């Protein structure tokens, strides 16, 4: 990818205090193509107890600053008490699988010796996203010998009927109760349901980084691109490329979008989803305080 210049459009999806499930925040935009220009942005809002629920906003990319519709109720809410997602759910990736829609998501659960537990889950729709049912009440990215800490934020590519890849955030340690360190690893599957992971690292830390967050992976011809966020003092957007989807080279210098002083992204930029519409790239992302102000849009140009 050549170096891109971005024009910030501003906040396009904002929390609505009148809706019980999104009193605050619109976090982690996750796109589903409905038609040529029509997309659903799945995201999580937070209720008055600060618990996350997944809903959507309908956007027409030909009128990219206008919300066409918004879900009055969440399509996925809290898991059963004691499950990995009993304190919140946040979308991470949407994959069409025949007549089914796979919603890969992040499940939240408060910790005791650490401040949180977060793992990747899966819910499936058989009615074009009107409703979702959990594939399992357990996480699909649970702790394992090679991944003994958090395993979350799955981004899934289906390249053939039996060739599925997941890129996910995996913890490598807790420095202290409030500071996990996590990089980006990958796993494989033949069905998008059960995953084999061997600890292969796609993106590792560079100097000053403690966290590499929520990958968004695209494929353009024979080149894979990965947008992600890294945190040192604060989250910033980063980019990497790969010829085979396994071995990645960081190209952070090609990320020209930066915080705007005094704005919704003055302190943080993270959780980008990038897509192409009519030859232009559209980037939906979160800013300060993990999307407290909503979802922002920037367009190539």
Image: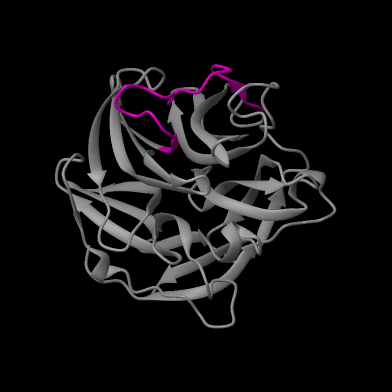
Image position of 222 (left or right of 120): left
Q: Nearer the viewer, residue 273 or 209?
A: 209
Look at 21% across and 53% down and name the residue there. Answer: 241
Question: Percent position (x, y) of residue 99?
Answer: 49, 22
Check the image and report above or below for 41 versus 252. above
The N terminus appears in which quarter of the rendering?
bottom left
Count of picture labels:
0
The C terminus appears in which quarter of the rendering?
bottom left
The boundaries of the magenta stretch are 131-154
Which coloring applies here? one colour
Look at 53% across and 83% down and name the residue there. Answer: 261
Secondary structure that dominates the magenta span: loop
Question: Percent position (x, y) of residue 153?
Answer: 45, 40
Q: Nearer the viewer, residue 49 or 21?
A: 49
In this view, which residue lies farthest toward the bottom?
Answer: 261
In reply to whether residue 153 is colored magenta, the answer given is yes
Question: Percent position (x, y) of residue 231?
Answer: 41, 60
Residue 160 shows up from this direction = no
Look at 81% across and 56% down and name the residue there. Answer: 17
Look at 37% across and 45% down and name the residue there. Answer: 182
Check the image and report above or below for 23 versus 294. above
Residue 188 shows up from this direction = yes
Image position of 56 (left or right of 286): right
Where on the picture, by quarter, is residue 299?
A: bottom left
Check the image and report above or below for 134 versus 62. above
Image position of 88 (left or right of 107): right
Where on the picture, by quarter, is residue 74?
A: top right
Question: Percent position (x, y) of residue 186?
Answer: 29, 34
In this view, which residue lies farthest toward the right?
Answer: 18
Q: Nearer the viewer, residue 138 or 173?
A: 173
In reply to whether residue 150 is colored magenta, the answer given is yes
């Amino acid at each position: 990818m050549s170096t891109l210049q971005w024009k910030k459009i501003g906040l396009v999806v904002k929390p609505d205090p009148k809706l019980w499930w999104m009193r605050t925040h619109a976090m982690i935009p996750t796109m589903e193509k409905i038609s040529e220009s029509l997309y659903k942005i799945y995201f999580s809002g937070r209720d008055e107890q600060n618990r996350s629920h997944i809903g959507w906003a309908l956007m027409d990319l030909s009128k990219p600053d206008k919300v066409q519709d918004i879900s009055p109720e969440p399509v996925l809410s809290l898991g059963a008490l004691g499950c990995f997602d009993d304190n919140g759910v946040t979308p991470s990736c949407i994959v069409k699988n025949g007549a089914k829609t796979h919603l890969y998501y992040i499940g939240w659960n408060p910790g005791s010796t650490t401040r949180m537990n977060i793992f990747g889950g899966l819910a499936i729709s058989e009615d074009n996203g009107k409703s979702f049912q959990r594939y399992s009440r357990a996480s699909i990215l649970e702790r394992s010998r090679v991944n003994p800490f958090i395993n979350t934020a799955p981004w899934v590519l289906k390249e053939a009927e039996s060739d599925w890849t997941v890129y996910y955030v995996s913890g490598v340690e807790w420095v202290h109760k409030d500071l996990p360190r996590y990089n980006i690893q990958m796993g494989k599957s033949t069905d998008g349901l059960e995953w084999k992971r061997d600890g292969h690292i796609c993106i590792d830390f560079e100097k000053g980084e403690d966290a590499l967050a929520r990958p968004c992976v695209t494929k353009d011809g024979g080149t894979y691109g990965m947008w992600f966020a890294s945190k040192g003092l604060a989250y910033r957007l980063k980019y990497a490329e790969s010829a085979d989807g396994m071995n990645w080279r960081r190209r952070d210098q090609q990320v020209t979008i930066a915080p705007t002083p005094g704005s919704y992204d003055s302190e943080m930029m993270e959780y980008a989803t990038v897509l192409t519409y009519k030859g232009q790239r559209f980037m939906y992302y979160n800013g300060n305080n993990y999307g407290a102000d909503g979802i922002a849009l920037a367009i190539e140009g």
